[in-house]
Image (tube, grey):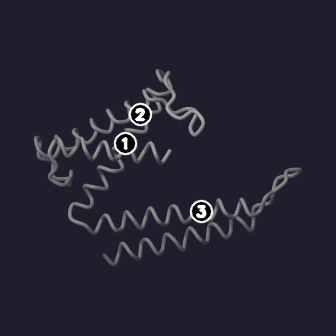
Amino acid sequence: GGSYRMLGAGTLLGLSAILLVHTSLTPPPQRVRVDLRRIVFLDVFGVMFVAVALGFCNLLMSVPHGQGWLLLLISCSWIGDGGAYFIGGRYGKHKCAPKVSPGKSWEGIFAELACTCATALFLRFLKVSIGLEWVMLPPLSVVECVGVSALLTVGGVMGD
């Protein structure tokens, strides 16, 4: 509990210091109109995004099976996004929202769902069938793994 809060607070302070040094010492490029408000907004937004994400990780670690949920979230997100990028970029023909995200295709979304499901089911297999203790997943059924994968896929698509 307390050590995670200290880690989060220290990270936020460190990122704030980096932001301050970055915005004050980085000279603007020559002959380019610099919108200082935009730069500061993006820097502040970036720091806040990381701080909020670390806060949620901290919160997630304090719930039962929190480490397993975090493992599931991160691994499914990484592998699902990678599958979506590869399959969507290579085989994607049917654009789902060309005005919002021109590169996003239905093939990529279904590839993300398949990769996310495969990852969740593989982690479940490692935990249930093989009995690896380091896989600290909550006791999820196959149907629950597919449901969590669908939610993560929707979140990943909406986040992009």
Residue 129 in percent (x, y) is at: 10, 41
**Which residue is disc 1 drawn over?**
153
Q: Within 10 angstroms of label 3, few (less than 14), some, or many (20 or more) residues?
A: few
Q: CA distance from mark 1 to mark 3?
A: 24 Å
Which callout, 1 or 3, points at the residue further toward the start of the chain? 3
Q: CA distance from mark 2 to mark 1?
A: 8 Å
Q: Mark 3 against mark 2, which lies toward the viewer?
A: 2
Which callout, 3 or 2, points at the residue further toward the start of the chain? 3
**Which residue is disc 2 drawn over?**
109
At horizontal 37% and vertical 39% (from top left) the residue drawn is 79
Q: For residue 84, which quarter of the picture?
A: top left
Is residue 129 depicted above or below 47 in this figure? Answer: above
Q: Within 10 angstroms of label 2, few (less than 14), some, or many (20 or more) residues?
A: many
Residue 34 in percent (x, y) is at: 81, 56
Q: Secondary structure at mark 3?
A: helix
Which callout, 2 or 1, points at the residue further toward the start of the chain? 2
At horizontal 56% and vertical 67% (from top left) the residue drawn is 15
Residue 128 in percent (x, y) is at: 11, 45
At horizontal 48% and vertical 48% (from top left) the residue drawn is 159
- 114 or 27: which is nearer to us? 114
**Which residue is disc 3 drawn over?**
45
**Relative to 39, is 103 on the left or the right?**
left
Q: Within 10 angstroms of label 1, few (less than 14), some, or many (20 or more) residues?
A: many
- For badge 2, the amino acid type reads Ile
- 135 or 89: which is nearer to us? 89
Q: For residue 112, which quarter of the picture?
A: top left
Q: Secondary structure at mark 1?
A: helix
